[in-house]
Amino acid sequence: MSLSDVGNLMCLPFDEIEPGEPSEVHEYLIQFAANQLGPEGRNWIPLVVKETAPDQYQVVGNAFIYAVAAEAGLGEVWCIIADDSPETVAITQALAQETQPKTNLSTASREEISAAIDYLMSQADSPLKGTNPASLVARLDDAPRQYWKDLKPITKLGCRITAGKKLKALEQIFYLTPKPLPEVITDRALLESLNTQQLKAMAKKREIEGLSKLKKADLVKLLAAA
Amino acid sequence: MSLEQTLQFLPSDATEAIVEGNFSKPFLKALGFEDLEMVPQFPVSNRAVDHAARKNTSNDIFLESFKNPHLYMEVKARSENLADQCHPNYCRAAQQLKHYLLDPASKSVKWGLLTNSLHAQLFRKHGKVVHPVTPCLPLDGDIKRVVKDLKQHLESPRRALIVAVYNNKGGVGKTTTTLNLAATLALLKKRVLVVDFDPNQSDLGDALNLKPLRGKILDILKSKEADARDIITSYKFEHPKLPEPLGFDVILADEDLISDVDEAKLKQQVKLHALRRVLESVQGEYDYILIDAPPNWRVFAQKAIYAADVVLIPARHDNLHSLQNAGMAITRFIPEMQAERRRFGEAGPMALPIFMNNAFRISDAQLQLMHQAVAKIIKDGRSSPTKFDLTPYFYPKFRKGHKDLRMISIPYMAYISRADFMHIPAAFAFKPAREQYLNLVKEYFL
């Protein structure tokens, strides 16, 4: 039998527990729960803690319970002891809905992008109100996003996303792990996202001549064909 | 040992493990798969389907490579009731099989087979749509015939998915939906045939600036050997920026169908399965056949639904009757046609989830009103004698323990109606409209 407490449900004295990441929920919710609980009550949904030293614990997840227990003045709190690996912390906080979910836009599938946008737009005060989700999803899915270094190119997609509040809102749910640009680019969408100067430099490198009078569309055509 | 003998020696209360161990292999063998062409407990993401099979090619042996499965078989114990399509056992098993078939790892799979050694049912996967192609076939009778039947399906797969767009309430956007789905699928490089089966309006042809046919459809529907290719018109959309024209094929409405013949007479001349037979003759050349069915529940609508593999039902959130009629189509009309089809040993048509067309800036109050109405329709469906559960048709994202009431919808767009005046499908003419319909296509078909 293992001597470790990891995985056990234990009743711990409240003053042995340190708050970790504090809960941000509204006081009203905390007060309501604390009233239901009372000073003698039992918290049937346990706090998740890790052991930092003998008789010293720190909250990993369900920080809301900690706030309620403090408000209700509980002497002892039921806790589940977790190990202190970062994966455990991540899982616990995701299960307790304490982290902002994030999607990797570099690799996400259409469904994942669609779900993320839908979530963002369903928020009460979403700055994305008024954008057309179907267009945004379709254009994001088609864009060469595996090479994006930041989300700025979204503003060029023509979906009424500007580099202010709206882009910030998208930054909350998307992150990127960009691939380096390939040496020779022939992908049309990607070429179009570059400016004329960059295109000309690229053409020069590939030793194509007679560039000076070409417009961007011609350059893209030339480079895509090469 | 032959398959009959295997079945004879199978205990009457055989558990899943026994059915899987004794029956699966001989059954798959009878269906034409060799020893090296099947894998038991085939891994699908982090679960496993009971059996997977695929014909070997000269340099790729399925048992070794485990790549590109073609058929999944899910086996159940004999005690599980698979004969009754409303039984919880059947629903759970079919759901499980569907889950495997739609897994991203199952891209190459075309068929799903559900069996408990007493019954078997074959499902076909076409893009994102999984629909039954046979009813639950009893295996205790003439098993040779059943095997022959299944084998015929497996060996000559049909290319097209036949979709009827139907709601017996008018004005919900059936024609617009049909047209734009066709255009969007054509943009995705699919071969599409559109059938305008609403001679009273023949709006579809008009929306494309094509004149209705005269008398030809009737001939084809009446005769047994007529070639549908004679009446197919192709529609091409050209644009200077397009390297080659986009387009799809159309069978236009027939004006004579309403002017010359009255309905009773038509019923005497043209059989219920006439349209299906006509479409079957050309389905090898298309990926999708879309039928624009008329509103109401009379001769034309019945033939259209009978001909379909799946039925797509548009409704409007602000139109109570369109919601009620959608419910009615699913609980009454479609099962009627399923019963007819079963007489010929076929399964289908199957209803797809309802989608909300033309939603114009829905306020919360309107939304609540609609949810209340839908809740009542669902309740009525449950208390009807057939105990039909309409929830998945209205709320396709509803899961056990997750009350997700999102619906599939297309918002109101001025572009869509404007395109009608231009006689071009909106999906060809305007990018935002195209993106809406692309969303719909991804939601249902691809």
Image: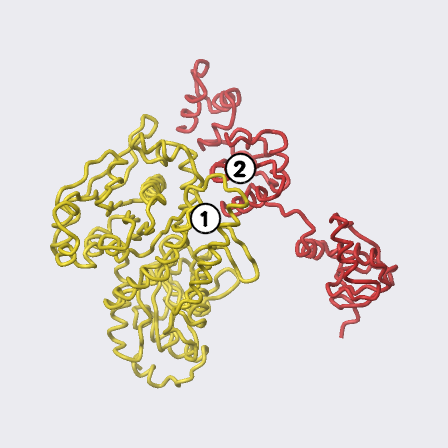
Question: Could you tell me which secondary element the residue under label 2 belongs to?
Answer: helix
Q: Is residue B157 above or below residue B197?
A: below
Would residue B138 be visible to someone looking at this image? Answer: yes
Would you say B104 lies left or right of A90 here?
left
| Residue furthest to the top | A213
Q: Any mark on residue B408, and which?
A: 1
Residue that badge 2 annotates: A145
Picture coordinates of residue A21, whole percent (x, y): 77, 50
- Chain of the residue under the numbered disc 1 shown in the image: B
Colour for chain A in the figure: red
Picture coordinates of residue B343, whole percent (x, y): 24, 68
Q: Is residue A37 above or below residue A134?
A: below
Q: How many marks?
A: 2
Q: Quadrant of residue A117?
A: top right
Picture coordinates of residue B46, whole percent (x, y): 53, 62
Residue situated in front as seen by the camera: B332 or B222:
B332
| Point 49% across, 23% down: residue | A199
Q: Which one is closest to the eye, mark 2 or mark 1?
A: 1
- Mark 1 is on which residue type? Ile
Distance from Cα at disc 2 to Cα at disc 1:
27 Å
- Mark 2 is on which residue type? Arg
Picture coordinates of residue B68, whole percent (x, y): 40, 58
